[in-house]
Amino acid sequence: MALASIKPESIEQVDNVQLRVLVDKERNRVVYAEAGKDFVDVLFSFLTLPLGTIARLVAKDSNIEAVKFGSITSLHQSVSDLDQQYLWNQTCKEMLLRPRNSMEDYCHNLKLNIDDTEPVQYFLCKKLDCRKKSGCLLSIFKDQKCYCGEVMKLQAFRSCFNLEDGFVKENATFIICDDLYVMPNVFGASLQLLQKLGVDSVDAIEEQTVVINKKEVVDLLKLSLISKAPLTEFIFKNQSVGNYSNLRNNIEYLIRETPSDEDRQMSVKVTLRKSNEKILFVEADDDFIDFVFSLLTFPLGGVLQMLQGLSSLSCIDNLYKSLCDLSPDIYFTSHELKHKLTNPPIAAQYELSNQILPIVGASIPMNYCHRYYDYKNQRLVTELTKEMVYFNYNRLCDETFARLKLVDPKSSTSKSSFAKGPSMYMVTDDLFVSPMSSISTMAFLKKSKVPLSDLEERVVKIGVKEGLNILKASLISTSALTNGLNQFTRTVKDIQVSTSALSAPQDAVRSEFNFEALGIDNTQSLVVQLPEASSCTQDSQLPRAPLMEELPPPPNIQEPHMNIAKKENENTASSVPALRRSARKRKGGGQA
Ligand SMILES: [Zn+2]
């Protein structure tokens, strides 16, 4: 690992951002960093990234080795491995592997934008007949077909469209704590921070200027997921003070009480070990699989909003809380933008029609298309507009405005989904999804070395509460199902599984493990021979060793900035009152 490039003074390059850092030389740690718009916009842009994008970015080597992002990494890998026949089309696979950022217009002009997902493009049919009718199809994905059967290839552009300039105001400066809490840059805040950190003498602190490029932003993203002191680890690479296994501010997987919506529950069949209640896998239909897939499309900020600011990724929680605490009038370009950033939607057309979690999809505010000749630039322009607006062009060449209809690449039925049903799937504890196959299951059990007598099946209903629990656990644990569903598998202990209780199609695999009746009590005695190309080969790629199990209880969290932040913002009403409540709870020594 290379040291962060510490250079004396300003280097003006488009892809570099400067960060002034105060370090405590005695204790080899960062006291805080001071930065302007460029760097703070980069930090806040983390909250706009879909989980699938984060998994993809942190899987790459930067200056730091690849990092596993809870169970999201294995989920992302499973989509990559999944045969396309289980999804509606190749576009669905692309959507899950490279989910779009609903706030890409704000991130595009950032000096260090690490989201390399292709921006939205707009396509119409090349045939004039298709284009002039009301209900003219618009696609925001490539290779989609028009009613006429032609692939839509005519590229269109949004009218009067300008990219936004990041999130915070141009001249605003901030203090960034080692744990990514962002505060207004006032001396009082830094003094209190120094005092709280026990720094008594200014002789012990030293200023450094760090020049950061995109690769280092990826380092910071990785560290923000795995470290409690990402800035210190970033600056003092090899003298790491962090303990990666202690990264959680709260090893609590429970979420706040959520009203359950029984109409929208899905049944899954859970196979677990009786001896330790650990879930080996669940067997589920495409509805549950769609839900699991959709986690990849959730922006991190949207996840934090659903989890009320308590994701257990401590630095991300701090970053999100500071975003909520900062005054929109003083620091953000608009109230609307701050609101959007605290609750970023899923990108347009990525939402499921039967999503159980309370997250919305962005909309495309383009209702009409028309084509005209632009004399100034001497070319034909295909334009998308919100309203029917006529400009001072030569009307004779203009096409009329046609009302648009968006093409949904996810399925052609009334249900908008990624997974193609009816099919049964197996989801392992780390959210690795594969098509259900009893033979693959045997291979999996054999590998897990679980005596068959220790296996038990239970049916669990997945609604909002269970979904949020799985989501929360998936961020920090490679046992997302065990940790997310633990409390629910217990409450249904008495329920005996019957195949009819499931919504599985009748031709689903026989799922009761009646091996004892066959005189088999150990899968190790079974020989499973599989052809090379079978779906079982996926099992061999499963990352098996859970990283986060059986950790020591969390240390008390040091949040030296909390009181300061409160003081700084006494006059700023928080837009997320629930967050304040949860923060108070945390200070009061734990979570309900
Ligand atoms: Zn057409």
Image (cartoon, grey):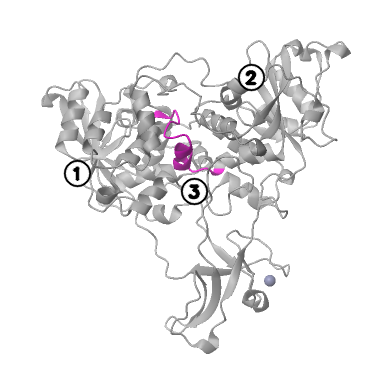
User: Which of the 4 image quarters holds residue 499?
Assistant: top right
Q: Is residue 378 above or below residue 73?
A: below
Q: Is residue 313 magenta?
A: yes
Q: At 21% across and 47% down in the image, what residue appears?
A: 10
Region in magenta: 297-315
Which of the two marks, 1 or 3, is nearer to us in this view? 3
Quadrant of the image for the C terminus? top left
User: Which of the 4 image quarters holds residue 512?
Assistant: top right
Quadrant of ligand 1: it is: bottom right
Which of 40 and 18 lies nearest the eye of the viewer? 40
Dot 1: element: loop
- Amino acid type of the residue that numbered disc 3 sits on in the rendered structure: Pro
Quadrant of the image for the N terminus? top left
Query: Crowding at label 2, few (<14), some or many (≥20) Cα neighbours within 10 Å?
Result: few
- Amino acid type of the residue that numbered disc 1 sits on in the rendered structure: Glu
How far apart marks 1 and 3 lie (CA) works out to 39 Å
Question: Which numbered dot is residue 491?
Answer: 2
Query: Residue 546, how many percent across, how many down?
Result: 56, 21
**Is residue 1 in view?**
no
For residue 415, side relative to residue 258 (left or right): right
Q: At 66% across and 35% down in the image, what residue appears?
A: 265
Q: Which residue is mark 1?
A: 9
